[in-house]
Image (cartoon, rainbow, N blue to C red):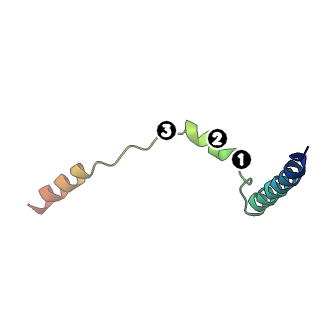
Amino acid sequence: MNIIYVLIPLSIILMILALVFFFWAVRNGQFDDLDTPALDVLDDDREPIDSTDESSAARDDAS
């Protein structure tokens, strides 16, 4: 029965912390755009730029 005296205040403190962090996230715009990040997965990756092609083209132009 003594554990209930520890668990009730602990649960109240955790609930208050969760509410504080939730309102902080809302105030800082964490929930402003919920659709775009889910669609970013579907976008194709950009082709990587091969730096060796650019450097060899620059050397060909210089000579």
Alpha-carbon span between mark 3 and mark 1: 20 Å
Q: Residues within 10 Å of mark 1 (few under 14, many from 20)?
A: few
Above or below 48: residue 18:
below
**Name of the residue lying farthest toward the front:** 2
Q: Helix, strand, or loop for circle 3?
A: loop
Residue 38 badge: 2
Q: Which residue is mark 1?
A: 34
Above or below 46: residue 29:
below
Q: Which residue is mark 3?
A: 44
Question: Along the polypeptide, which appears first: circle 2 or circle 3?
Answer: 2
Question: Along the polypeptide, which appears first: circle 3 or circle 1?
Answer: 1
Residue 61 badge: none
Tell whether 44 sits left or right of 21.
left
Tell whether 31 sits left or right of 55.
right
Tell whether 37 sits left or right of 48.
right
Q: Residue at x 73, y 63 (%)?
A: 28
Q: Residue at x 24, y 54 (%)?
A: 54
Q: Position of residue 26 (x, y in %)?
A: 78, 58
Say what amino acid the circle numbered 1 marks: Leu
**Name of the residue lying farthest toward the top:** 42
Alpha-carbon span between mark 2 and mark 1: 7 Å
Depth check: 12 or 53 in front? 12
Q: Are marks 2 and 1 in contact (CB under 8 Å)?
A: yes
Say what amino acid the circle numbered 3 marks: Asp
Q: Position of residue 62 (x, y in %)?
A: 12, 62
Say what amino acid the circle numbered 2 marks: Ala
Depth check: 14 or 20 in front? 14
